[in-house]
Image (spheres, grey):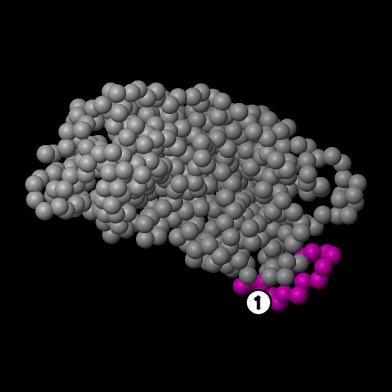
Amino acid sequence: MLAKVLSSAVLGVDAYMVEVEVDIKRGLPSFQTVGLPETAVKESKDRVKSAVGNSGYNFPDDRITVNLAPADIKKEGTAFDLPIALGILAATGIISQEALSDYLILGELSLDGRVKPVKGSLSVALAARDAGFRGVIVPEKNAPEAAIVKEIGVFPAVTLGALVDFLSARCSVEPVSFDVNTLFEQMPWRDLDFSDVKGQEHVKRALEVAAAGAHNLIMVGPPGAGKTMLAKRIATILPQMTFQEAIETTRVYSVVGLLREKQALVTRRPFRSPHHTISDAGLIGGGHVPRPGEVSLAHNGVLFLDELAEFKKNVLEVLRQPMEDGEVTIARALSSITYPANFMLVAAMNPCPCGYFSDPNHECTCSYTHIHRYRSKVSGPLMDRIDIHVDVPAVQYKDLIHGNSAEGSDKIRQRINRCRAIQASRLKGTHIFCNAQMTNRHIKRHCGIDKQGEDLLETAINKLGLSARAFNRILKIARTIADLEDVSHIQPQHVSEAIQYRSLDRDNLSV
């Protein structure tokens, strides 16, 4: 007898339909799975056999063939356990085929029949909604994330036996639902606030400008100047995520399996800080079984690279595509997978190997050759894609002891929220939401400057040898500074401040 169960699998962050066909015929007992199953899918036969038997049902001693269609796409993971088990029970007449036709079903089975969580439930729920299904049946622990999709019913599966009773109408299961708005209630950041930072007012100003326009930023200074401390606090002043941004970010965390238990949605902007020994696959994504890297886990948030010059050069170079395109594409022989990677890069580095080049309080012990080799690890094209360069000098003793109470993160975030609202209104209907994402067409339309501003830019370009990309980034930064002041037209002082944020282009900092 033949039975069909509709399930789903994830490719990248998008889900696609998989039809699980179960055919049982008389013959020598066997269990064969076809349709390009990988190892975990092939092993499902042992889990399914034990789960069916331990749930009180007879497992057929016949020839069982399971086909996962479409058969030309490799199937991975353990989410097909539950559909295969239900297909076997439907093929033996325990469940009606009609009861299965309205649902998209996925879940891993334990040997005693419990349904265990799987990855990618949110993407599956979105795919089920778009395909017009009545609902999805997912493991109980995955139900909160799937229930974010309001247009379909999400039914939690606890055990195989309880699910068979539900599909046979012997009991009822209420779909999971909750108020999404409660998830966006602002949670305080524990032990992190800009009021903790003494001195460094010009650096905090640069961080505020960067956060207001989602501009990439690099901090250069000696050890102990507070670069890491400042970087960790930038997440506390970023604006709250929109619902669409939260959905995009949650999909990435769902397919990787990084959602915490009972966490339905990622509502706080990610802050990822990989170690400098990370590989290019770890940073950008990939591997034998492709999975998102740190740039995708930082989607709609911050990617912090501490000790930037200590990263391998080939690792840093792979950042160029996602920084430019907002996504990363991993090509394989049989397929190509695209992950979102629209992040704000915050980097920190020492000015030289010993860390004290140009520091008035310490003598630098590095030779010209060592300094040049150290800085050349960060290529010109990569540095060109970083909007804001800021020097972070050592904190003076008087600022540490007698420094006035600094402005807190909440107050700074209020200004940034107003600034982002201005940008969203200006860029409405363009599918971009902040100044850093503006294209050349948007720059021409929204970043006009007067004659005095043009003269400032001309002088800066001639003296610093700026590229066309750096020219455009100065205009975008000036636009953000004007938005922070709620000024409709870019003024010369805005251009002047934006030029100051290209410190690594200046001759007096070159070696």
**Tag 1: amino acid:** Thr
The secondary element bearing badge 1 is classed as: helix
For the record, the magenta segment spans 357-373
Residue at 51% across, 53% down:
294
Q: Quadrant of the C terminus?
A: bottom right
The chief SS type of the magenta part is loop
Residue 107 in view, yes or no = yes
- Which residue of the protein is positioned furthest toward the left in this rendering? 26
Quadrant (top left, top right, bottom left, bottom right) of the N terminus: top left
Position above or below: 391 against 423: below
Q: Position of residue 30 (x, y in %)?
A: 16, 53
Residues 272 and 116: in front is 116
The mark tally for this picture is: 1
Q: Position of residue 88 (x, y in %)?
A: 21, 40
Measuring 18% from the left and 42% from the top, which residue is drawn there?
21
* Residue at screen point 66% across, 44% down: 234
- For residue 441, side relative to residue 16 (left or right): right
Q: Nearer the viewer, residue 379 or 511?
A: 379
Q: Is residue 315 above or below residue 468?
A: below
Determine whether, in the image, residue 168 is placed left or right of residue 452: left
Give the vertical position of 422 relative to 353 (above or below).
Answer: above
x then y, percent, for residue 325: 45, 48
Q: Residue tagged by mark 1?
A: 369
Magenta highlight on residue 427: no
